[in-house]
Image (cartoon, rainbow, N blue to C red):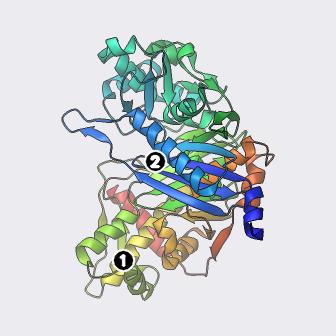
Amino acid sequence: MNERDMVMSETKRYLGLDIGTTSIKAAVFTKEGERLALRSVDYILDTDSSTGYIEFDAEKYVEMCKNVIDELSLECGKIDALSIDTQGETIIFTGDDGMPVYPAIVWLDNRAAEEADEIKARFGNKRVYDVTGQPEITAGWPASKVLWMKKNKPDVFSKITKIFMLEDYIMYRLTGNFVTEPTIQSSTIYYDVVEGKWWGEMLDFIGIDESLLPKVVKSASLVGEYKGIKVVSGMLDQIAGTLGAGVTDETRISEMTGTIMAICVMTDKMPEYNPDSIIPCHLHAVDGKYCLILWSSTAGMALKWFKNNFAENFSFRELDELAEKIAPGCDGLSMLPYFTGSTMPKYNPDARAVFSGINLSHTRGHFARAIMEAIAFTLKQNLEYVGDSAIEEIRITGGGASSPLWAGIKSNVTGKVLKTLSESETACLGSALAAAVGIGDFASLKEAVDSVVKTKKTYEPTGDDYTESYANYVKLDKLLN
């Protein structure tokens, strides 16, 4: 055995399992944050266009997770601990034997619209927000789905003895222990995020007893074992991603520009209810903290739309080069990026995308840059809405982070320092760090994140002035949105 092999044999290894909507990613890291291996498995949801149902076989989730854990164990050797982050709101119902009595109802499923209306009529948006942090009452929330099951599938409902979120179910099938943690329960709307307990009044209304629900433990708590690997409670995928990006206090936020844009802001307290806001507030995995999750349904998809339809022979890098030649403000060309409606800070599903101020001098580069600037303006709007005075730094991830031009535009527009990350799989890293905390190798999530997460590139404001172009954007937004 050579020296490196001897060192690696003594190295602790932590597995972070990230279960997204259409793929599972799993990565193994050392205590220093070195990634040793990565697996990714894609899957296709079961959809029914006639009913709008979106489901998945819960056993397939378990099978895929066990397979990647076993594969990574073979590749990396002994894995000391694992933790899981998952999509929120996907719900699984089981009977006495712990096996599903119905397919997993995925978070995207909207079958429970009538039930959501019933909950809204009974409690109202403000009451639900004040207890759960969720400003909307939608068909996607597990409470709505439970009520739908009670009304529409009474034969199935009568067999239910356990109700899981997806994270809970994977932990249960790995360890046999029926537990959950607060971040994944924050959007069920039957968990009281203020008191830290199940909301009895909501449970009574949707027709279930607390005995059907798991024991609540903190994120990063030791739950049990799977094949000698310690299993540690995880968190919501967005929160794992923000921890993997190095966000542990209010001076930093994370921003992901992929198909959509997602912004995660840590806060000490839940904001007061605002009837015009749909910004959800989740419990954070870091004790005593909350996480505001803001998003725009259009970000990278806008640039992809432009490339596919008007610059199909150009790569994204070549579009960057064209846009870089254009002055800030795009010589008067403005854009609203609402291809699928606007979400935050103002919700308007009927809003649509607009280019304004077009003249004969505008080129491909102008339009590409106008899209980048519009997404940066959306970021600035959202930060102003939540209050950005304490924010000093934005940790950026997603495909948009690979564009130096776009990162520079965002830095100048927001006036903040932007940093990319050395590790691209931030959710897997966040979960792996939770695993390390759960077995005592770090004292807290904050210590783990601050010790391990490393940045790569830094973008600072260079003085490019977007004052006038941002004012034009806001004016156009108010006029048309």
Examine the image and state in which quarter residue 99 appears.
top left
Left or right, 276 with reference to 51: right
- Give residue 284's position: percent from left, percent from top: 64, 42
Q: Residue at 56% across / 29% down in the picture? A: 172
Q: Secondary structure at mark 1?
A: helix
Could you say which disc has been placed on residue 20 in the image?
A: 2
For discs 2 and 1, the disc positioned in front in the rendered view: 2
Density class for disc 1 (Cα within 10 Å; few <14, some 14-19, many ≥20) is many
The residue at which mark 1 appears reads as: 368
Q: Residue at x 31, y 16 (%)?
A: 153
Residue 48 percent across, percent down from the top left: 23, 37
Image position, residue 334 (x, y; %): 37, 72
Give the farthest residue toward the right.
443
Q: Is residue 139 visible?
A: no
- Of callouts 2 and 1, the N-terminal one: 2
- Is residue 147 placed above or below 396 in the rendered structure? above
Image quarter (top left, top right, bottom left or bottom right) of the C terminus: bottom left
Element type where label 2 sits in the image: loop
Task: Note whether 187 is above or below 340 in the view shown.
Answer: above
